[in-house]
Amino acid sequence: MAPGFAASPAKDRAAEVLTVVLFTLAAAAAQLALIGNNSFTGDEQVTLLFLRADWSELWGRLWGADTHRPYYYMLLKAWSEVFGESRFALRSLGGLLHAASLPFVWVLARRLGGRRAAVWALAFSVLSPLAIFYGRDIRNYPLVTFSIFGSLAALSALAAAERAGAVALSTRRRVLLWAGVTVGAASAFYAHSISVLYPMLVGLWALGSAMAGLVSWRFVGQLVLAGLALALISVPAVLPMLHHAETTLKDFWIPPTDPGRLVSQMRDAYPYPAPLLPVVLGLLGFGLWRLRGSGAAGLLIPAMVIGQPVALALLGLVEPVFITRAMVWPAMLSSVLLGLGLAGLPGQQLRLGVAALVLLAQALAARVDYVAHYQPSEPERLAAFFDRIDPAETDLILGRQNVEHTLRWDYPALFDGPVFAFNKGDEKIIYDAANRSVRVLRAEADALPLTRPYFLIVRQIRPPAPPGDEVTPALARIAARGRLVAQAEGRWWTAELYERTDPP
């Protein structure tokens, strides 16, 4: 064979690698732009609480404290020890995990629709609205997406090999791919408990494919073995999940699943502007249509994109779990369908026109999540006040226990001594074990054991602060035990420093 012809496949592979690298870098840039500007959200503040825990606590008493295992918290804690604790440093991990998911998108789309479909799937993944929003949170969703996409890429290769024949894969490669399927599923489950649905969806897909003759029953048997390995790996995470399913979900904040809830959450999962939504939905539908005849590997994509929200809706009839954030990865996976649909349109001008509309819809949907100017956190707003506090001389009282999240992040020394906290309705929060503050009942306010010359009361004054009649009377009884010497008010908090006047 002539040298020119021999070099062509290598050049093609190099071009494909370069394409994936460029889009991955673009996704990282889109994620990292301005991520340090907005303050930590409520859920992010929970992450801060666990980051302040010791490694021994994360492995020990806090293993089952949250509804998810502290796998992501451990990863982020290790990351912060290398790159620092700034907002940019903490949030960059999720952004980079999102970007690292794009090579798996390429693999899935390339296998089903060729190079053109894969390129467009990458383009649509860069600005996938839900991935943009949750990719920049210091929460576990980018890790779930990365883990499941890796598992799906391996599973798709195995399914495609079924279609090509038994000799399409060597035994060694087949074992490695099944290991990838299993490890990815386990990683997702340890990151977020709702990922327990993923292996269930895979099982239903495999059974349906086998019954339709798209995969062999030998393939199903191999999947069962992988499932047994997954179950064994997941034992340390299953028991805490079952505990929270029996306790936490019985009184969770997510509203019951009804038609209105289904519509609103699905609309948030695909938050495209109304005038452009028909274009996006039409392209998704055409992408689905183009999967006909593509075998089990093609069926895998809609089984996940459609199956996850359907499974959540069915589970929501029993427990309140239907929420947009549980659909981050299937919403991003729909970029594969968008790429397939666009690649199948006739004519370059039509493809470019539709692509421009979809990208515009994505940009408009994602734009609202960017904060152009730096927003200080509440401890930063009140820094001049807190910097003057002597932790060794001051007892700390919180009007709402969640105030601890960011205050302890910026001023951990305030939590070295006695810290007491109230909650609305005297409720105990889910992850109470991660708090340094001791929850106090409102009726016990008079007997609060203050031992230091000063005490500091920090209360939340904006929603979702407890209503005044919930904790204010209790705080007022404590305040009566001292003389106000300094106070400051921020946007969400007010802080009051008292010198004790009651007998020791």
Image (cartoon, rainbow, N blue to C red):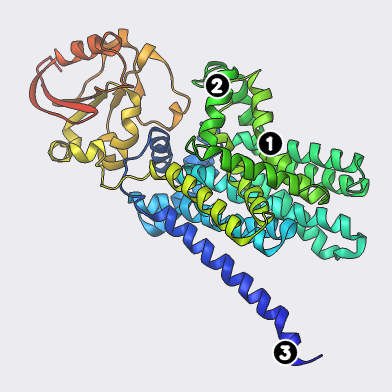
Between residue 273 and residue 163, name the one nearer to us: 273
Residue 257: image tag = none
Q: Which one is earlier in the sequence, the residue at label 1 or at label 3? A: 3
Q: Report crowding for label 1: few under 14, some 14 to 19, many 20 or more residues within 10 A (C-alpha).
A: some
Q: Disc 2 to disc 1, how far (Cα)?
A: 17 Å
Q: Report crowding for label 3: few under 14, some 14 to 19, many 20 or more residues within 10 A (C-alpha).
A: few
The disc labelled 1 sits on which kind of residue? Ile
Determine the residue positioned at 55% across, 19% down. Answer: 260
Residue tagged 2: 261
Left or right: 336 in relation to 79: right
Q: Which one is earlier in the sequence, the residue at label 3 or at label 2? A: 3
Determine the residue positioned at 27% across, 8% down. Answer: 469
Residue tagged 3: 4
**Secondary element at image label 3:** helix
Left or right: 334 in relation to 417: right
Q: Disc 1 to disc 3, how far (Cα)?
A: 45 Å
Q: Where residue 186 sits in the image (x, y, percent)?
A: 67, 45
